[in-house]
C-alpha cells in the first residue's frame, strides 16, 4: 500500500535548479531494531528518542542534465572535501529509492555533508546522514510537486530514509519515534516511522543522553551483517516477540513517567541486543572491558543515590547514559569524577531529546 502511495506518476513542474539544506539528528533506540526482512523491513517494532546535538547537515545541489542519464550523476563532499569512499553507499541508496522519485537520473547532484560529532567517535552517522539526504530529496520533490501535504512529506521522507538505513527512518521527527507494526499502536507500520502517538510524560520530553565514547574505532561488525545473523538465530523468534511486548509495556511507563519501569526495560533491551550478538553464529562481543566497568559503576551509583540514571547501548562499545533533566547536575558530577576514566581520551558528548530534523 505504501509503495504505491509513494510512487509518483508525473510531476506538474519540470526542470528545477538550486540547492536545499537539511539538518537531521541521530536517534537512540530504547527498544532495539535488530533483525530485518527484505526490503529493509524490521523484524520487530522499535522505539527511539530523537537526539538534538548529534546531527548531520546535508546540502543537496541539483542541476538538470541535458538528457536523462543511464547512471546516477553525483559526487559527495564530506566536511569540505570530495569523499569518494562514501559514493558506493549513496549509489546503492539511489538504486534503492529510484522507483520512488522520477528525477534521480535527470539531474547532476552534489551532496555536501558534515556531522556535528567528530568523524571517528564510534557514533554511527548513517541514521542522521540518510535522514538528512532523504529530506533533501523530498524537498526537491516538493518543489516539483507543490501541492504535496506536510504529512505526506514526512511519511515519505521516513520511508525513503528507511531504504538507506533502517534506523534512519526514526530521525525525521521528535521527541520519540516508533517504527514497525505493533498491534497496540494504531497507525504503526513497518514501512516508515511515526511520531509516538500516545501520551508521553513531561519527564521524557527533556531526557538527557550523555554518550561515553569508550571506543572511537570503526565498527567491528557492520549492522547489516549483525541483522543478517538474526535469520539463523536460535532465539530470534522469542526476541522479536519480546520486543513487541516491551513496546506494549512502555505505553504505561511513558504515560505515567514511571522511571523505575523505564530503567528496567531499557537496560534489559540493551543487554538483550548484545546477548543476541553473543549467541549468533558467528558470535561476537562488541562491549569492551570499559563498557562493563561503566555499567557496574552506574548500578552502584543508582543503588547509592536512588537517582534515575540508566544506560543503553548500540551495536558497539559506547555507552549512552539516559537520565532526567532535573538530575543533570549530580549525574554530570558523577560522570566527571567516576566515568571519564573509561572513555577514550576522556571524550563524551552531552546530548538530549530533540524535536527532529530542520530545514535550514
Ligand atoms: C543496534 O539502522 O544501522 O542501532 O538498517 O542495516 O542500516 P541498517 O541498520 P541500522 O541498525 C541499527 C541497529 C541498532 C538498534 C536500533 O537503532 O534500533
Image (spheres, rainbow, N blue to C red):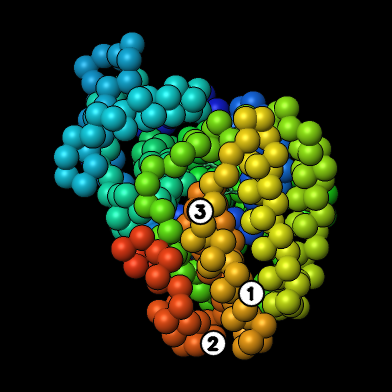
Q: CA distance from mark 3 to mark 1?
A: 17 Å
The residue depicted at 82 percent of the width and 42 percent of the height is 238
- Residue 76, compared with residue 250, is above or below; it is above
Crowding near pointer 2: few (<14 within 10 Å), some, many (20+)? few
Residue at image location 58% in from the left, 39% down from the top: 284
Instruction: Please provide percent x and percent y for residue 174.
Output: 54, 62
Find disc 2 in the rendering and name its residue.
326
Q: Is residue 198 visible in this depiction of the protein?
A: yes
On the image, the x and y values in percent for residue 162 come to 54, 39
Question: How far apart in space, not on screen, are marks 3 and 2 (Cα)?
Answer: 30 Å
User: Which residue occupies the foreground of this view, 214 or 158?
Assistant: 214
Q: Position of residue 80 (x, y in %)?
A: 17, 44
Q: Which quarter shows the C terminus?
A: bottom left
Judging depth in this view, the residue of 288 and 124 nearest the camera is: 288
Mark in front: 1 vs 2: 1
Indicate which disc, 3 or 1, sits on the residue closer to the N terminus: 3
Label 1's element? helix
Seen as rendered, the residue at the extreme top is 70
- Residue 231 located left or right of residue 360: right
Q: Residue at x 73, y 64 (%)?
A: 265
* Quarter of the picture holding the N terminus: top right
Q: Dot 1 surroundings within 10 Å: few (below 14), some, or many (20 or more)?
A: few
Q: Which residue is mark 1?
A: 299
Q: Are marks 3 and 2 in contact (CB under 8 Å)?
A: no
Answer whether labels 3 and 1 touch (C-beta < 8 Å): no
Relative placement, left or right, of 44 versus 350 is right
Residue under the point 42% across and 24% down: 92
Q: Which residue has dot 3 on it?
A: 288
Q: Quadrant of ligand 1?
A: top right
Amino acid at each position: 500500500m505504501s509503495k504505491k502511495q509513494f510512487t509518483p506518476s508525473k510531476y506538474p513542474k519540470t526542470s528545477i535548479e538550486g540547492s536545499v539544506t537539511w539538518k537531521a539528528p541521530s536517534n537512540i533506540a530504547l527498544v532495539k531494531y535488530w533483525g530485518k526482512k527484505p526490503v529493509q523491513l524490521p523484524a520487530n517494532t522499535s522505539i527511539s528518542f530523537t537526539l538534538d546535538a548529534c546531527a548531520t547537515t546535508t546540502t543537496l545541489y541539483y542541476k538538470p542534465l541535458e538528457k536523462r542519464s543511464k547512471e546516477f550523476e553525483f559526487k559527495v563532499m564530506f566536511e569540505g572535501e570530495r569523499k569518494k569512499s562514501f559514493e558506493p553507499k549513496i549509489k546503492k541508496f539511489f538504486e534503492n529509492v529510484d522507483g520512488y522519485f522520477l528525477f534521480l537520473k535527470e539531474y547532476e547532484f552534489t551532496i555536501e555533508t558534515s556531522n556535528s560529532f567528530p568523524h571517528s567517535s564510534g557514533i554511527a552517522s548513517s541514521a542522521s546522514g540518510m535522514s538528512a539526504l532523504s529530506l533533501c530529496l523530498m524537498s526537491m520533490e516538493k518543489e516539483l510537486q507543490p501541492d504535496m501535504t506536510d504529512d505526506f512529506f514526512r511519511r515519505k521522507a521516513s520511508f525513503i530514509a528507511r531504504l538507506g538505513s533502517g534506523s534512519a527512518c526514526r530521525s525525521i521527527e521528535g521527541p520519540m519515534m516508533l517504527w514497525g507494526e505493533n498491534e497496540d499502536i494504531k497507525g504503526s507500520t513497518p514501512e516508515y516511522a511515526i511520531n509516538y502517538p500516545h501520551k508521553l510524560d513531561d519527564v521524557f520530553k527533556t531526557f538527557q543522553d550523555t554518550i561515553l565514547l569508550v571506543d572511537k574505532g570503526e565498527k567491528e561488525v557492520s549492522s547489516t551483517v549483525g541483522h543478517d545473523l538474526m535469520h539463523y538465530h536460535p532465539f530470534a523468534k522469542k526476541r522479536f516477540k519480546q520486543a513487541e511486548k516491551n513496546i506494549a509495556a512502555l505505553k504505561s511507563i511513558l504515560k505515567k513517567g514511571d522511571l523505575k519501569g523505564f530503567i528496567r526495560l531499557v537496560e534489559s533491551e540493551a543487554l538483550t541486543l548484545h546477548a543476541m550478538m553473543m549467541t549468533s553464529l558467528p558470535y561476537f562481543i562488541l562491549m569492551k572491558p570499559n563498557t562493563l566497568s561503566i555499567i557496574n559503576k552506574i548500578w552502584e551509583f543508582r543503588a547509592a543515590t536512588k537517582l534515575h540514571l540508566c544506560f543503553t547501548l548500540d551495536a558497539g562499545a559506547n555507552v549512552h547514559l539516559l537520565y532526567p533533566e532535573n538530575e543533570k547536575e549530580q549525574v554530570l558530577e558523577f560522570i566527571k569524577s567516576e566515568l571519564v576514566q573509561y572513555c577514550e581520551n576522556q571524550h563524551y558528548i552531552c546530548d538530549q531529546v530533540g524535536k527532529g530534523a530542520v530545514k535550514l
